[in-house]
Amino acid sequence: ADDPFAPSGDVGDELPLQSPTGGSTGRSRPAIQDDGAGFLAIGEGLQPRLVVEKGPGLTEGAEFPIGQGLTIGRSRSNELHLEDSFVSHMHARILRRGAFYYVEDLGSTNGTFLNDKPVEDGTPVRVRDTLRLGETVLRYEE
């Protein structure tokens, strides 16, 4: 029998948005693009951002849009300025390459950690990954 909950179409197809009652809303959204390695390409309408889990002087749940990329550190010249004494002035950056985001440590004193593992330059970031810089923990969301 047909599964009413099975996705229809192929990866990359436009999918109709469904109302809670099951009818079409008349709008569509791009399907998620899977690169085959477990990473999801950024589609239209997604808003990549960092969400504060904890950090000195930050409000839990506060969101910082990433846009095409941003730098993170104690210096006020960073797009994401942190008041964390364990964070370097220019600590890390997140940059977009094609449809994906990557995190790089900028030679920080205390390191940058993605899911509690030291960041190697150009480490890809996935949804719900946690980024730790000093005492600050941020979560990547789209």
Image: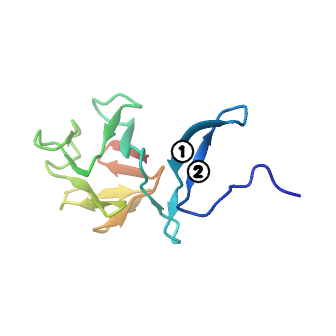
The residue where tag 2 is placed is 15
Specify which label sits upstream in the sequence, 1 or 2: 2
Give the residue at x 19% y 57%: 109
Give the residue at x 75% y 49%: 5
Residue 81 drawn at (x, y percent)? 19, 39
The residue where tag 1 is placed is 28
Residue 106 drawn at (x, y percent)? 19, 60
Of all residues shown, which one is farthest toward the right? 1
The answer to whether the residues at label 1 and label 2 have Cβ atoms under 8 Å apart is: yes
- Judged from the image, the secondary structure of the residue bearing numbered disc 2 is strand
- Judged from the image, the secondary structure of the residue bearing numbered disc 1 is strand
* Amino acid type for the residue under numbered disc 2: Leu
* Amino acid type for the residue under numbered disc 1: Ser
Of all residues shown, which one is farthest toward the bottom? 36
Question: For the residues marked 1 and 2, what is the alpha-carbon distance in whole angstroms?
Answer: 5 Å
Q: Is residue 100 left or right of residue 9?
A: left
Q: Find residue 77 and report its image quarter.
A: top left
What colouring method underlies this structural image?
A: rainbow
Residue 86 drawn at (x, y percent)? 23, 46
Q: Please, is residue 23 above or below residue 139 in the view?
A: above
Q: Please, is residue 57 above or below residue 27 in the view?
A: above
Give the residue at x 38% y 43%: 47
| The one of 120 and 93 positioned closer to us in this rendering | 93
Residue 122 drawn at (x, y percent)? 30, 67
Tag shown at residue 117: none
Q: Is residue 5 left or right of residue 73?
A: right
Of all residues shown, which one is farthest toward the front? 26
